[in-house]
Amino acid sequence: MIEQDIDLKEGEGIRTAVDVAIFNNKGEILLGKRLVQAGFGTWGFVGGHLRTEEKIMDGAKREISEELGEDVQVEPINEILAVRENFLEPNFIHHITIIIKGEYIGGDIKVNEPKRCEKWEWFSLDNLPSELFSGVQETLESFKQQKITVISDWR
């Protein structure tokens, strides 16, 4: 009998997510003001948890549509800007988030999930709001320096 080389229980409880840092043709970044418990009142990227057997790019496209509406045109780019791990209040669930780049093409951006997001706004990278969600500042600083960063917000 061949021995199993992987412990199928290892890693249980770790959630995987994808965020999309969406830039327009002016170099501005799109951020949403969060209304969910984790990071309430902070500004964050479009994104969310991957579904079982969902590919990263498919999850990114789904999250863009779910959060911004069907009319918006954003092209997710196969480029990783950062990887963030965190363990945030109130649920304290270990998360690994892959943050990719997205390019805004056009269309009407809507608050498509009003219980989760108050509003979407464009910001200059030199004039970001003070209350940023976990890893946003570090991701954008790394983007300016053209490098990929692993961000840990483990508390």
Image (cartoon, grey):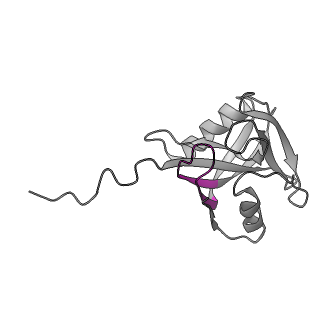
Magenta segment's dominant SS is strand
Q: What is the x, y in percent for residue 92?
A: 56, 48
Quadrant in which the C terminus appears: bottom right
Q: What is the x, y in percent for residue 95?
A: 55, 51
- Is 149 left, or right, of 71 in this rendering? left
Q: Outermost residue toward the left?
A: 1
Q: Is residue 95 magenta?
A: yes
Residue situated in front as seen by the camera: 72 or 129? 129
Please tell me in which quadrant of the rendered image residue 47 appears: top right
Residue situated in front as seen by the camera: 133 or 66? 133
Q: Report the magenta residues as a range.
A: 80-99
Question: What's the residue at 45%, 47% (across, down)?
Answer: 13
Question: What's the residue at 29%, 55% (across, down)?
Answer: 7
Question: What's the residue at 44%, 39% (across, down)?
Answer: 52
Q: How many marks?
A: 0
Q: What is the x, y in percent for residue 62?
A: 60, 36
Relative to residue 24, is residue 148 depicted above or below? below
Q: Is residue 32 magenta?
A: no
Residue situated in front as seen by the camera: 146 or 74? 146
Q: What is the x, y in percent for residue 115?
A: 72, 28
- Is 32 left, or right, of 85 in this rendering? right
Question: What's the residue at 30%, 51% (across, down)?
Answer: 8
Relative to residue 137, is residue 46 depicted above or below? above
Quadrant in which the N terminus appears: bottom left
